[in-house]
Image (cartoon, grey):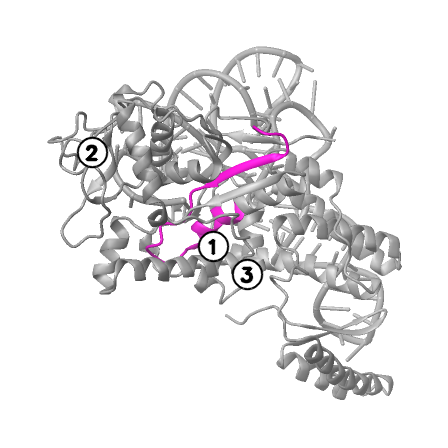
Amino acid sequence: MSSLSLYDTLTRTTSPFVPIKAGEVGIYLCGATVQAPPHIGHVRSGVNFDILRRWLTKSGYNVTFIRNVTDIDDKILHKAVHEKAPWWAVAMKYERAFSDAYAALNVAPPTYEPRATGHITQMIELMAQLIERGAAYAPGNGDVYLEVRKLDSYLTLSRQKVDDLLPAADADETYKKDPRDFALWKAAKPGDPSWPTPWGAGRPGWHLECSAMAHAYLGEAFDIHGGGLDLIFPHHENEIAQSEAAGYAFSKRWMHNAWVTASGEKMSKSLGNSLQVAELLKTVRGIELRWYLGSAHYRSMLEFSHDALAESATAFRRIEGFLNRATEILGSAPIPVISQGFTDAMNDDLAVPTALAGISEAVRLGNSAITSGDKAVIAASASEIRGALEILGCDPFDSAFVISGGADLTEALDGVIQLALAQRTAARDRKDFAASDQIRDGLAALGIIIEDTAQGPRWSISQISEK
RNA sequence: GGUCGGAUGGCCGAGAGGCGAGGCAAGGGACUGCAAAUCCCUCUACACGGGUUCAAAUCCCGUUCCGGCCUCCA
């Protein structure tokens, strides 16, 4: 039995996972800044860490998974001006868009999903603590800064030196002791939302909220902190700085997912709307998009293309097709089983691509078993595949993906199709292939695929979308 | 300038000293009235130049190219 090892950005090595408290895992994942609709890069992070969470849970841990919502920041305020709507309406609109995207991709809701604006109290407490300990200062203009040169281990995650950083172009040194000092709190500007503090009214800096919320929900020390690669600096460095300066051990391990790239480059707004989740879901189903996003290793760049997405969906349908046929033959959905091969792959820093090779092998074996009529092998293969898909969040039997048209409707539809199939079989028996093909083509035009198997004709609803 | 990563077959994507991952596409075959689905076979690669080693896609040195971060970022 292998045991779980995970990569740690801090040490740049893979090491055995040992929880702080036996049987428990606390994870904090930096979630969305809700200022635009989600694109696939955003949800890749959600999918990757959802797989981690599922695997930890399957491994027997009680997982507390926190993913925050940043619902106040500069961009949201700008967007609000642009959209001529209150900032909170903008934030809520996009928060819902993110929730919809996560749901479509079967990313389980986090244990708790705190919003920044709901934790101002905790942020003020944290700032007070930092000032009291001499780590932060309020120069009197309403801002509060963290004094980075006083920290011993600042920038260890990104392995940089304070003096090597390019000074920020817009650094205001009127109040900062050092241009690299960063704002915990920003003084209120006229017209912007603000909250009262002992140092003046204002709003949180970008980094403070995560330290405050991680502390509130996971305590002074927790197991894993996650996020996208681009958050390492400055966001995660600053979280570490704030939390450690406050006297907390903070996160024991750091995990970062790589990007979805397009033409070799990190996705950006310039690509327009085409890679938004909502747009892509017009071409493939949620389960297929998830399969695509989850199938590359989380630390590898995933080069997006519509062709690659389409081919990934094709590959998934082959697996799904086998499970459906197996279910028909076995008379019930396969019971999920986690194979040793899958366990070994997942325990090796979530080696999903390796695990996928095992799934392909099982599909091949299972399909051969259908031909030979070996029910034991069919059941074993199907169980192993379903067990793996469950962890990857791509189980086609998951209620998240099953379109609930109602059992009655499916039965009625089946009755109608069986009627047509009986006509077709009769036509084939009298070698009237023109008539039989007419029935098959007619059903195909309605999106119903007919396949002749050794057990007779079977039908399924086409998953291939026209686009 | 600092720092971090990448280059693998037609395409996508693993692997990290020896037994050619896997998928998709393509070609051939089996099955089929024809399809579809499925199975079998074929195509077999590690940017370049040195080095270490019995053995290098993998380690070391160098080169080229691509990309991230350096205070908005998943």
Label 3, secondary structure: give it.
helix
Magenta segment, which residues? A20-48
Residue under the point 30% across and 58% down: A88
Question: Where residue A242 appears, x then y in whole percent?
Answer: 34, 30
* Position of residue A362 in the picture relative to residue A285 (left or right): right
Res. A299 visible in picture: no
Badge 2: few (under 14), some or many (20 or more) residues near its Cα, within 10 Å? few
Q: Amino acid at mark 2?
A: Ala
Any mark on residue A168, and which? 2
From the viewer's perspective, is residue A339 above or below residue A168? below
How far apart marks 2 and 3 lie (CA) works out to: 41 Å
Q: The disc labelled 1 sits on which kind of residue?
A: Ser
Q: Is residue A241 above or below residue A408?
A: above
Within the magenta stretch, is there residue A130? no
Mark 3 to mark 1 CA distance (whole Å): 17 Å
The residue located at (24%, 54%) in the rendering is A77
Q: Is residue B45 left or right of residue A117?
A: right
- Between residue A317 and residue A68, name the one nearer to us: A68
Q: Which residue is mark 1?
A: A305
Alpha-carbon span between mark 1 and mark 2:
35 Å
User: Mark 3 or 1 closer to N-term?
Assistant: 3
Residue at screen point 57% across, 57% down: A311
Q: Position of residue A121 (x, y in %)?
A: 33, 42
Q: Which residue is mark 3?
A: A286
